[in-house]
Amino acid sequence: MGWQIHLHLIAAISWIGGSVFMFVLGVSLRDKKDQQAVYPIIGPIFGYFEMVSLVLLLTTGMLMISSNGLMEILFLDIHNQVIDSLRYKLIAVVFLVVMTVVHFIVAMKTNGKERTTLQQFISRGSSMAIFMVNLLVLHYAIVIRNII
């Protein structure tokens, strides 16, 4: 595992920490004027930073799964706490990636513009889903780490 786990952890800290920061920012900025001043500037910077973190997480995660011989086991009918937790984590990660892509597309398309009600719903819904699923992924990462 070596360097992969270190890079994976740094990327996870960046990804989840950024998610928590944006969640707190979104909750605390109630004034529409403040939102319009902050989000067009911080949004793209944060979005690209988070995409790099996500790519690093996916890459290092797949490398660790592969280098530990878990790739084949994931698709077999084998059940134990580590393999099942890894499967649940990976299902959550797939959902997380889909929600991130949806959120990124809407955010970049509407950056600095007035959003429609549907765009606002999709943006906030995907943002909340990303935040909640991050906690689920973190839970399974902790479960796996505690077992190993």
Image (spheres, grey):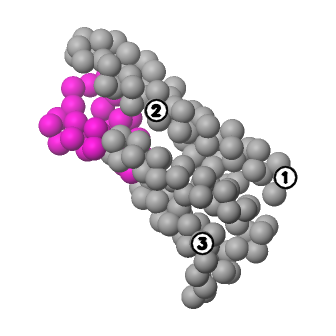
Q: Nearer the viewer, residue 45 or 125?
A: 125
Q: In the rendered image, which quarter is residue 15 located in?
A: top right
Classify 100 as above or below 90. Answer: above
Residue type pointed to by label 3 = Gln
Main secondary structure along the magenta-highlighted residues: helix
Q: Is residue 110 magenta?
A: yes
Residue sticking out furthest to the bottom? 77
What quarter of the picture does the C terminus occupy? bottom right
The answer to the question of whether label 2 and label 1 lie on touching residues, with beta carbons closer than 8 A, is no
Q: CA distance from mark 1 to mark 3?
A: 23 Å
Q: Is residue 89 visible?
A: yes
Residue 49 covered by magenta stretch = no
Determine the secondary structure under disc 2.
helix
Q: Position of residue 73 (x, y in %)?
A: 66, 80
Q: Position of residue 60 (x, y in %)?
A: 70, 54
Q: Check disc 1 and report the residue beneath it.
A: 2
Asked whether the beta carbons under mark 1 and mark 3 sit within 8 Å of each other, the answer is no
Q: Nearer the viewer, residue 139 or 46?
A: 139
Q: Residues within 10 Å of mark 2 (few under 14, many from 20)?
A: some
Which residue was labeled with disc 2? 20
Kind of residue sitting beneath label 1:
Gly
Query: Residue 81 got which mark?
Result: 3
Q: What stretch of residues is rendered in magenta?
A: 99-125
Residue at 63% x, 49% y: name it.
Answer: 57
Distance between the Cα atoms at labels 2 and 3?
28 Å
Q: Dot 3 lies on which element? A: helix
